[in-house]
Amino acid sequence: MSIVRTAVFDLFRAHGITTIFGNPGSTELPMLNEFPGDFRYVLGLQEAVVVGMADGFAQVSHTTALVNLHTSAGLGNAMGAIVNAAANRTPMVVTAGQQVRAMMTMEALLTNTDATMLPRPAVKWSYEPPRAQDVPAALARAFHLASSPPAGPVFVSLPMDDFDAEVDEAESLTLARRKVVSRTPPMPGPIADLARRLSSAVNPALVLGGEVASTGAIEVAVALSERAALPVWTAPLEGRLCFPQDHPHFQGFLPPGISLVSAALGGHDLIVVIGAPVFRYYPYLPGAFLPEGASLVHITSDPQEAAKAPVGDAIVGDARSALELLTEYVTPSGRRVPPRGRPQPEPDLVEEGGMSPISVFAALAEAVPSHAIWVNESPSNSLMFQDHVRIGADGAYLFTTGGGLGFGLPAAVGAQLAAPRRPVVAVMGDGSMHYALPAMWTAAAYGVPLTVIVLTNREYAILKWFGRLEKVSGIPGLELPGIDIRSIAEGYGLATRHVTTRDELTAAVASAVSAKGPTLIEVPIISTIEDLNR
């Protein structure tokens, strides 16, 4: 016979997981008793930070992340980050401790009452094993579900007295060795029909989403684009690099408004969307969903996404398989003129009294190595970032598609832990920084060589832009005076720099990306509401 704890860690090993992100409490200590030497426990000082780090780690490592939280209190603190992970389609197993079974009925202190209800509907599956002996099977099921398309977080509640219970060793080994293959190609017939439509269309376009990246299909997307002379857009509010942004076929990032998407795709008669929703919209800017004369075909692994799309036909299946089949079936374009690349970004602006966001991003584009992983959580400057920082096939990009702040800083820490030999640069707004400050402690404590660029404008600039759009005024709480972000970072153990010129920024970044620990670089910026429309 074996015990639950041994069976659980054997199961983790079988799934290639030896890193646990957590913030434990008393109900989690029995699981961590005699913690195995071949495992790494990455501590976060707040639960949303823990989940954010796991999110970035999973996306960069292409594995399922494992999270260890403290009963209902810790799970509640983490819920916003779990919502982001669900929107990001990040495979993640979230566990939380539970009171001992003998005291659950009386709802003693730290009992997670109705434990499976709290994380819904943000998770794919939520479960509490009815017996201690069912814990390994529940976790095995959780790993299979988290990684099955569409990937996403799942939750398992674990009573604290379960881990020393005996289990059948043979059954545990069978669970650990069991594999579930989840990749499901779309039906060849509809893909062949779509390939014929692509071949005969006058001016088709390709719109790509995060599933292209998560299935490792970027090179296949490039091959399809080049074979059929297709212009390529990134879907609205996408959180991953889906296509090399320096490729001549890349046209840019679709805006998230209904009328704006339609206008951006004007002139295209066939629009093929792969691995993204149709579409992520915000704010509400009504209009036609598609330009006049255009049709749309949507390929997604998520039947829910296929069902809720407001326009177009849908094919349910794996993004990589669909791209491979389309590349095989489509007729090479001999008559279609290859698309022209994006125009060069507008020139650097020289401002009195500080740098503009454009100045900052132009400098970063030159200073940061091409194989860097970029994380962006500077909402008011995202459009300018996308225009100036053109990430090639060697790089990577993370951004939360869930709309909630607090993702960027911990995700960058997790990304660096997943890829320690690659530079990671997080571009943060001074407002966004404060949703996940404790991530800086983890970066310093674990020696994570992260570069954090904080664009300081001492306001929620994006909300001022929305205020103008929504025709409201006199809104309180949009100013952020009196914050010394460098002192805060130094208190957590980071090296810091304060720069005011492009040359200073370039030198600071060169030093930071070669450092052995985390560095925060504060850049005061001059920005106006009009900048957001660029």
Image: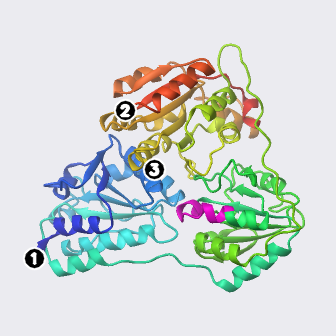
Cα distance between the residues tagged 2 and 3: 20 Å
Q: Amino acid at mark 3?
A: Gly
Q: How is the image coloured?
A: rainbow
Numbered range of the magenta stretch: 211-222
Q: Identify the residue under disc 2.
A: 516
- Local SS, label 3: helix
Figure quadrant of the C terminus: top right
Query: Residue 13: x, y in percent?
Result: 27, 65
Cα distance between the residues tagged 3 and 1: 38 Å
Q: Identify the residue under disc 1.
A: 1
Q: Residues within 10 Å of mark 2 (few under 14, many from 20)?
A: few
Q: Earlier in the sequence, mark 2 or mark 3?
A: 3
Q: Amino acid at mark 2?
A: Lys
Q: Identify the residue under disc 3.
A: 56
Q: Amino acid at mark 1?
A: Met
423 to 491, vertically: above or below:
below
| Residue depicted at x 19% and y 71% | 132
Q: Residues within 10 Å of mark 1 (few under 14, many from 20)?
A: few
| Residue depicted at x 41% and y 42% | 413
Cα distance between the residues tagged 1 and 2: 46 Å
128 to 507, vertically: above or below:
below
* Residue 411 in magenta stretch: no
- Local SS, label 1: loop
Q: Earlier in the sequence, mark 3 or mark 1?
A: 1
Please state which of residues 258 and 490 is positioned toward the viewer in this rendering.
490
